[in-house]
Image (cartoon, helix red, strand yellow):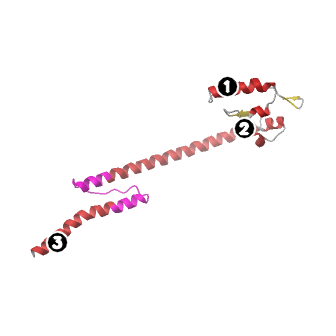
Amino acid sequence: LIILGAMWFGFRLAKELVEPILALGKATERISKGDLSVRLEDTSNDELGVLVASFNRMAGDLEHSRNSITDANTKLERQNLDKEQRNRYIEAVLDNTAAGVVSVDSLGQISTINKAAASMFGVSAQALIGWNVRTLLRSRVEGELVGELVTHFQKSPEAPWKREVAVTIGGREL
């Protein structure tokens, strides 16, 4: 009877030690599948209790981080949609403007050109995207205008720059 009682006590003690470890393993598996709401309950103050408390903190931190990233991605998507709508609006306005408008980046490459400007140069707008503005303006204007443009964008790339220029193309002043 003593041996039987000792065996029962040993199995019971083993079960008390193994159950929290099995629960921790199952919870870890659920977290690895994306369920970050998993929390374990263990009120003990021993090593397993400390491990469970650490696991619960880690799961909470992961859930908070994922929620923050999801919120940031949603906000970024919204901002990208707003920016895309503004760009389409600006393109629509520029395409319906009689004045020729050419925008260039800090390296002097054409990033946008409206229909009026493309018509003035006798080329399609898409064909000019990526060209260097110096190639487009081969005249005395190139020296002063492009030099001023490049210098401006190298010093302060975010500051707007505007200049109206008369260019002679095919005997016509545009």
Q: Nearer the viewer, residue 94 or 27?
A: 27
In magenta, the rendered stretch is: 25-54
Q: State the SS at label 1.
A: helix
Q: Which residue is mark 1?
A: 151
Q: Are marks 1 and 3 in contact (CB under 8 Å)?
A: no
Q: Which residue is mark 2?
A: 112
Q: Residues within 10 Å of mark 2 (few under 14, many from 20)?
A: some
What residue lies at 75% left-to-right and 23% top-to-bottom? 144
Separation of marks 1 and 2 at Cα, in angstroms: 20 Å
What residue lies at 17% left-to-right and 68% top-to-bottom? 10
x and y percentages locating residue 72 in the rendered image: 50, 44
What amino acid is labelled 2 in the image?
A: Thr
Q: Tell us which disc is closer to us: 1 or 2.
A: 1
In reply to whether residue 26 is colored magenta, the answer given is: yes
x and y percentages locating residue 42 in the rendered image: 26, 57
What amino acid is labelled 3 in the image?
A: Trp
Q: Earlier in the sequence, mark 1 or mark 3?
A: 3
Does the rendering let one see residue 15?
A: yes
